[in-house]
Image (cartoon, grey):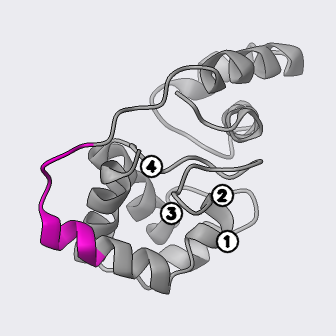
Amino acid sequence: AAQPPLSIFYQLLQFRDQRRKGGGMEAIAATLSEQDMRDIAAHYSAQTPPSPHTGGDAIKISQGQQIAQQQYCSSCHGAQLQGQKHVPRLSGQSTEYFVTQLRNLRSGARADMDGTMASAARSLTDDEIEAMAAYARSLP
């Protein structure tokens, strides 16, 4: 919900073209036309964004914020990690999903459009990824 439409569209393209795998999305995306993908992207981008998680571990959230600043996450994902253009929204994202995707980018199990995220994730430890996930989940 509330992802930038272009981000959703590009993810669907990656699933359709077998450049991204997971959750059976490859089979679903294989049947979609580009117009279908644009329509799906418009629908989901118009949904209400997830609510921020309140009451999380304040120390972990603060660490995650520091790491996100050091990694310049806001330069692509926006000031509040809300996403923009083809770059996905991270704010409010499920911790489990965030951690899984960043670990997959780090390991090379998941490719991204231009390699930027894979490169950024390579230096992150599991603890840093978990702290960043807590921070992103805390954002509106």
Contact check, label 2 and label 1, Cβ < 8 Å:
yes
Contact check, label 2 and label 3, Cβ < 8 Å:
yes
Instruction: Identify the secondary structure beneath mark 1.
Output: helix
Instruction: Identify the secondary structure beneath mark 4.
Output: loop
Disc nearest the viewer among 1 and 4: 4
- With respect to residue 115, does 101 lie above or below? above
Residue under circle 4?
A: 91
Direction from residue 45 to residue 89 in the image, left or right: left
In front here: 93 or 21?
93
Label 4 – label 3 distance at C-alpha: 18 Å
Whether the magenta-drawn stretch holds residue 95 is answered as: no
* Labelled disc at residue 116: 1
Residue under circle 3?
A: 105
Q: Which residues are magenta?
A: 53-63
- The residue located at (45%, 49%) in the rendering is 91
Can the viewer see residue 80 in this picture? yes
Instruction: Identify the secondary structure beneath mark 3.
Output: helix
